[in-house]
Amino acid sequence: MTLPRTAWRTPLLILIAGCVILTLSMGVRHTAGLFLQPMTMDHGWSRETFSFAIAIQNLVWGLASPFAGAIADRHGAGRTVLGAAVLYVLGLVLMAQASTPLAFDLSAGVLIGLGLSGTTFAVIMGVIGRHTTPERRSLALGIASAGGSFGQFAVLPIGQALINAYGWQSALLLLACGVGLIAPLAYAMADGHKPAASGGQSVGQALREAGTQKSFHYLFWGFFVCGFQTAFIMLHLPSFLVDGGLSANVGMTAVALIGLFNIFGSFLFGWAGGRGSKKDLLVVIYAARAVAILIFMMLPLTTVTAWGFAAVMGILWLGTVPLTNGLVAQIFGLRYMSMLTGIVFLGHQLGSFLGAWLGGRIFDQTGSYGLAWTISIVLSLLAALCSWPINEKPLLRPAGA
Amino acid sequence: MKPQWRWFLAGAGAALLLLLLAAIFMAYQMPELLLDWSNLSYCG
């Protein structure tokens, strides 16, 4: 008897390949800010020109994720990851050559945004979800999420070291080479998706079905809050700490602590999601975030409270990812998991955009971040309340539907 | 693989991972990275 040609694609190999892809794609994306100063100085651009392209990137990433997921569900994740990796590499190479704001918007904004949509959570989690048993799925998604978290944490100093050693243009090309490693790994993601689990459902039917389910809307808005808080805190916490009289070094260490504890938190909540109720854990995460922010606001601002807050928020940071994606798979099945998680991820990105922008806007208008922290607490409580009524049971579909 | 070897390799792997994480954490204290913090706060 001969083994099928795909026998080498074991769940463990797919998980490892998925982790590496997420490490590379999330990590390289996280270095974008390091290029602001050298690029704007060399080209004579304003900071707004640069940050506008990155804002486009975040929006394109979110908007394209449902489509990348749908393409992966229909034509296979391997092709989607490969195509997205090519766009990502092209975006980085053209970003290094861009000499006008428009060229920069198209490369750093559009192309890299499209590349991210096909090489991050929506597509990768779908493949991993399809290749793990329901008992181990949440843990596997947690490990993959920890991979993405590790990338965000690890690639940032590497990016800075590359810029220091070779200059920003060469650093971008070297990072493009790193992203290029995703291309061969895409072969492991070519899972030959399994339509048997769809019950003969079409894309339109799957979308209509999800749209009628309150649980899907709750997941979307919960993830919106997650995006709002993470973007707001990552962007504005260091400034908040410096405004409060602490040194910039304390702010940088706080960011490092968030990144470090995020790795453990992603893994921890993925593991816990396989043993208990995922929606209850989401309630815990969102409620704990509200409590953590409230306590942080009430305590005097010191190095210890700042680092303690960063560590707690790091634990709660991306623990939502394996739980939210796991719930989508659990409720709606695996056939259109990538597309549906892509839609939920769009909510995350819209929240990120709002959190980043509104934090700055509120500071400019009021001279403090107080209102933004209050909004963050209220949204966190609303997300906890939204997550509570989620129905975790798999949808029952009539035969042939 | 014998169970004791499996445990040894898993422990060694975990120790190496912790060392790696500690090294990366220390890298965040690089002055160059610190100087570029203002860039990050613009772009997330």
Image: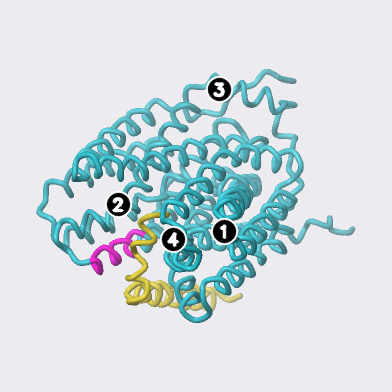
Chain colours: A cyan, B yellow
The residue sitting at the right extreme is A1
Residue A289 at x, y percent in the picture: 28, 44
Q: Which mark is residue A236?
A: 2
Q: Give the residues drawn in magenta, as a range.
A: A248-258
Locate residue A5, reporting x and y percent: 83, 57
Q: Residue at x 30, y 65 (%)?
A: A252
Q: Which residue is the site of mark 1?
A: A25
Which residue bears the numbered disc 4?
Answer: A33
Q: Nearer the viewer, residue B43 or A385?
A: B43
Q: Which residue is mark 3?
A: A211
Task: Estimate the spatial distance between the alpha carbons at disc 2 and disc 1, rounded to whole Å.
Answer: 24 Å
How would you rate the neighbour count of disc 4 (Cα within 10 Å): few for under 14, some for 14-19, many for 20 or more? many
Q: Quadrant of the N terminus of chain A?
A: bottom right
Name the N-terminal-most of marks 3 and 1.
1
Query: Which residue corresponds to the image point at 62% horizontal and 25% vertical from the top-left?
Result: A207
N-terminal of the two: label 2 or label 3? 3
Q: Locate the C terminus of chain A and report the quarter of the image it occupies.
A: top right
Mark 2–mark 3 Cα distance, whole angstroms, equals 34 Å
The amino acid type of the residue labelled 1 equals Ser
Residue type at the position of mark 3: Gly
Q: Looking at the image, which residue sits at the far bottom?
A: A165
Circle 1 marks a residue in which chain? A
User: Do discs 2 and 1 share a chain?
Assistant: yes
Relative depth, front residue between A210 and A141: A210
- Rendered image quadrant of residue A73: top right
Q: CA distance from mark 1 to mark 4?
A: 15 Å
What element does badge 1 sit on?
helix
